[in-house]
Image (cartoon, rainbow, N blue to C red):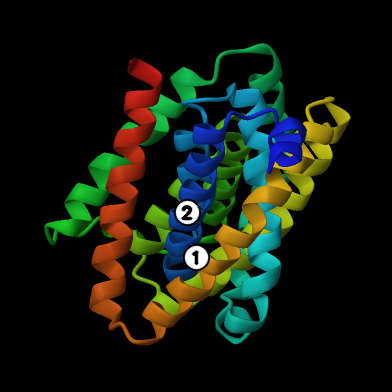
Amino acid sequence: MEQLLIWTELLLPEFWMVLACGLVAGLCRGFSGFGLSALIVTSLTLILLPSEVVPIALLLEMISSLVMARMTWSAIHWPLLRWLLIGAALGVPIGVLILKFIAPDPLRIAISLSVLAASLLLFFGRSLVLRETGGRNFSVGLLSGLANGAASIGGLPVAIYMMAVALPAEAVRATLNLYFLILDAYGTGALIFAGLLDLVTLARTAVLVLPVLLGIWLGNKVFKRSSALHYRYFVLCLLMVLALLGLAKSLL
């Protein structure tokens, strides 16, 4: 234990907090297909700098996506995924530059407010009347890539968009999973190029892998026993919580 604390540069209470956060984030990821990055970043920035936490979140997302790939592959919505990835490929480098040179708070506030408003409308039965198009898919991917590189909250715009166009729960979860695998592999490469990945980050990520995977396993079990309506309400509530946490983090 003492050696782990040295490698991760954490105090013992911080170490246990990190493990608990990983378990909760993994549980949400396993059920909904997203949320891990936002929960990890929001919780761990209480004890670490954002530039230290974002690389951890990206690495954990890649591991999570690989684990969930077999669970979700058959339900992927490929036309949507292709346009999202094209947009994100342009957005991620801009987001990483924001993270390294500019405060990402204004971007986080804008995205959090938009997601919160849209989630409330959808939760209370209002229709946003969005129809899926290539241009719209590309724009959402661009915004998602930018948000992911800067603040590791790229899942929020994509998830709320999928809710607004009323995709089936299986398609939302599966498409988000593969999207994050490719997006975060790209984002991690950009972080390495920017010099934001080091041995301490790798040690902290390694410590989090087990609780995150346990959470994913539990979340997947719950998903299999849930209805589409339960999934929709859980995702919308999760989006509202994440949006509020993003606002609190930026404003306080």
Please tell me whether mark 2 sits on a helix, a strand or a loop. helix
Q: Looking at the image, which residue is at 38% across and 32% down? A: 246
Q: How many marks?
A: 2
Q: Residues within 10 Å of mark 1 (few under 14, many from 20)?
A: many
Residue 153, numbered circle: none
Q: Secondary structure at mark 1?
A: helix
Quarter holding the C terminus is top left
Type of the residue with mark 1: Gly
Locate residue 237, reporting x and y percent: 26, 55
Residue under numbered circle 1 = 215
Residue visible at 40% across and 73% down?
A: 167
Amino acid identity at mark 2: Ala
Q: Is residue 73 above or below residue 185?
A: below
Point out residue 35 in the picture as x, y percentages from the top left corner: 46, 53
Q: Residue at x 44, y 72 (%)?
A: 219
Residue 144, by quadrant, is top right
Which residue is pictured at 26% across the width and 50% down the height?
119
Quick one: quadrant of the N terminus? top right
Residue at the far left: name it. Answer: 124
Residue that badge 2 annotates: 25
* Left or right: residue 80 compared with residue 89: left
- Outermost residue on the right side: it is 193
Rounded to the nearest angstrom, the CA distance separating label 2 from label 1 is 7 Å
On screen, residue 20 versus residue 69, left or right, reads: left
- Dot 2 and dot 1 residues touching (CB under 8 Å): yes
10 Å crowding of disc 2: few (<14), some (14-19), many (20+): many
Relative to 233, does residue 46 appear above or below in the rendering?
A: above
